[in-house]
């Protein structure tokens, strides 16, 4: 009987917990149930997605993808229906590298001191020796002239071209778009603006890659550009510059006005020369876009400030490590292998390029000073831990 009584007591306790017992327990169980119902209602409300909506979104995504593909095909058709005639002055390793891609979209010719006629022919391009380039510019159709010479010879190259550009303007009434691809930007920009005829449109660019880093293609590579001068007007392409009604940056001259809606307009934006100049620049930039580049528009001054703390310090580090004679070992970590790759890629470039990054970017000296200071700080902390006064390490 005692066992039966204990069993009944346990059963009563279980019933009370699930709501079969007294009113108090029943109310408690009802509260739990109402809370669960409320939570389920809130979850259902938050996830009240009509049946089939995901499928509709997938269809819309497919439609937009097809539209984008169609627009790209139309864009390519426009590029190829009116191919640019592009000259690459400085047909060395980098000049050949960019000319190969240009040849997919336009009529390309190279020009240099050496004889690269066979290499140009292999990529479907023409070739004219640098000694004949001036007459070629005067007499032939040239839409774009890309200056891919070394930074140390850049100024002399520009000055040599000026008389022929002036003759072309006198005899043909037009001038090619002049493009630079140097690793520093303010220096070549100033040379171009100081020496070229004011009628010359100027585009300053920096492909942040080369034959080694982009051997597999340009997809995802960074391309920086500033539309420097169009139709005789300097353009402010800084990232913080206000835009005109056409999305263009305000020019740095005073020929702008604001309409009743507060939108700034450029006096030149509707002139035929301005429209043609913008179209030519757009078609040239589209080549880089079609090759998959990440397009970054910024002023030359902004570029040089950023580059001193990214590109220059990368080359500086690679050169310093290279001077140490680092070599692969049987126990290399991935981090060390990355350092060896850095040494290899930076030292593959000419010292003229490295020197130009230093000499022609006013921010580079500051970067060197900060690097020295950081090295002193880190080494000083090591020595302090060992109780050693700062001194010079053995350079074995």
Image (spheres, rainbow, N blue to C red):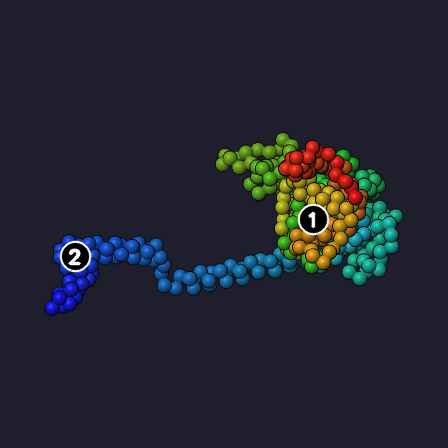
**Residue where numbered disc 2 is placed:** 26
Label 1–label 2 contact, CB within 8 A = no
Q: Residue at x 81, y 41 (%)?
A: 152
Q: Residue at x 63, y 44 (%)?
A: 297
Q: Residue at x 83, y 40 (%)?
A: 156
The numbered dot on residue 166 is: none
The secondary structure type at the circle numbered 2 is helix
Q: Where is residue 171? Give x, y as percent.
A: 81, 43
Q: Where is residue 316? Give x, y as percent.
A: 73, 43
In the displayed structure, 352 sits above or below 17; it is above
Q: Nearer the viewer, mark 1 or mark 2?
A: 2
Tell me which numbered mark, 1 or 2, is placed earlier along the sequence: 2
Please state if 265 lies on the left or on the right of 120 as rendered: left
Q: Quadrant of residue 265?
A: top right
Check the picture and name the quadrant holding the C terminus: top right
Give the spatial CA distance, label 1 vs label 2: 75 Å
**Residue where numbered disc 1 is placed:** 207
Q: Residues within 10 Å of mark 2 (few under 14, many from 20)?
A: some
Is residue 389 or residue 330 the one in the foreground? 389
Check the picture and name the quadrant holding the N terminus: bottom left
In the displayed structure, 221 sits above or below 233; it is below
In the displayed structure, 83 sits above or below 390; it is below
Whether residue 382 appears in this view of the structure is yes
Q: Residue at x 32, y 57 (%)?
A: 44
Q: Where is residue 71? Give x, y as percent.
A: 58, 58
Is residue 298 or residue 143 the one in the foreground? 298
Please state if 393 lies on the left or on the right of 240 as rendered: right
């Amino acid at each position: 009987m005692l066992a039966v009584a204990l069993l009944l007591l346990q059963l009563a306790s279980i019933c009370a917990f699930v709501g079969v017992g007294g009113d108090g327990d029943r109310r408690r169980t009802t509260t739990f149930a109402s809370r669960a119902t409320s939570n389920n209602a809130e979850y259902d409300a938050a996830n009240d997605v009509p049946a089939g909506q995901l499928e509709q979104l997938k269809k819309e995504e497919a439609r937009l993808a097809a539209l984008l593909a169609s627009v790209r095909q139309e864009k390519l058709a426009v590029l190829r229906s009116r191919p640019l005639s592009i000259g690459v002055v400085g047909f060395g390793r980098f000049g050949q590298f960019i000319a190969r891609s240009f040849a997919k979209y336009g009529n390309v010719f190279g020009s240099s001191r050496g004889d690269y006629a066979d290499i140009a022919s292999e990529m479907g391009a023409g070739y004219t020796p640098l000694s004949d380039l001036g007459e070629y510019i005067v007499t032939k159709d040239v839409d774009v002239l890309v200056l891919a010479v070394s930074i140390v010879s850049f100024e002399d190259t520009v000055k040599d071209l000026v008389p022929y550009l002036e003759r072309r303007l006198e005899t043909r009434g037009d001038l090619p778009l002049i493009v630079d691809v140097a690793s520093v930007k303010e220096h070549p920009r100033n040379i171009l603006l100081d020496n070229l005829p004011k009628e010359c449109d100027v585009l300053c660019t920096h492909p942040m890659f080369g034959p080694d880093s982009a051997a597999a293609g340009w997809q995802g590579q960074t391309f920086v550009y500033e539309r420097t001068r169009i139709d005789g007007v300097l353009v402010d392409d800084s990232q913080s510059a206000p835009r005109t009604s056409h999305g263009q940056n305000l020019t740095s001259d005073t020929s702008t006005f604001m309409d009743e809606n507060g939108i700034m307009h450029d006096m030149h934006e509707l002139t035929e020369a301005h429209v043609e100049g913008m179209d030519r620049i757009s078609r040239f930039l589209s080549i880089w876009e079609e090759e998959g580049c990440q397009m970054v528009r910024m002023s030359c001054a902004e570029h040089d400030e950023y580059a001193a703390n990214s590109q220059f310090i990368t080359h500086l580090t690679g050169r310093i490590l290279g001077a140490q004679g680092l070599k692969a070992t049987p126990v290399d970590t991935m981090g060390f292998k990355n350092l060896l790759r850095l040494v290899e890629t930076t030292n593959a470039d000419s010292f003229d390029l490295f020197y130009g990054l230093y000499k022609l970017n006013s921010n580079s000296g500051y970067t060197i000073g900060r690097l020295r200071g950081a090295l002193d700080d880190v080494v000083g902390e090591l020595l302090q831990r060992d109780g050693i006064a700062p001194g010079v390490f053995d350079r074995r």
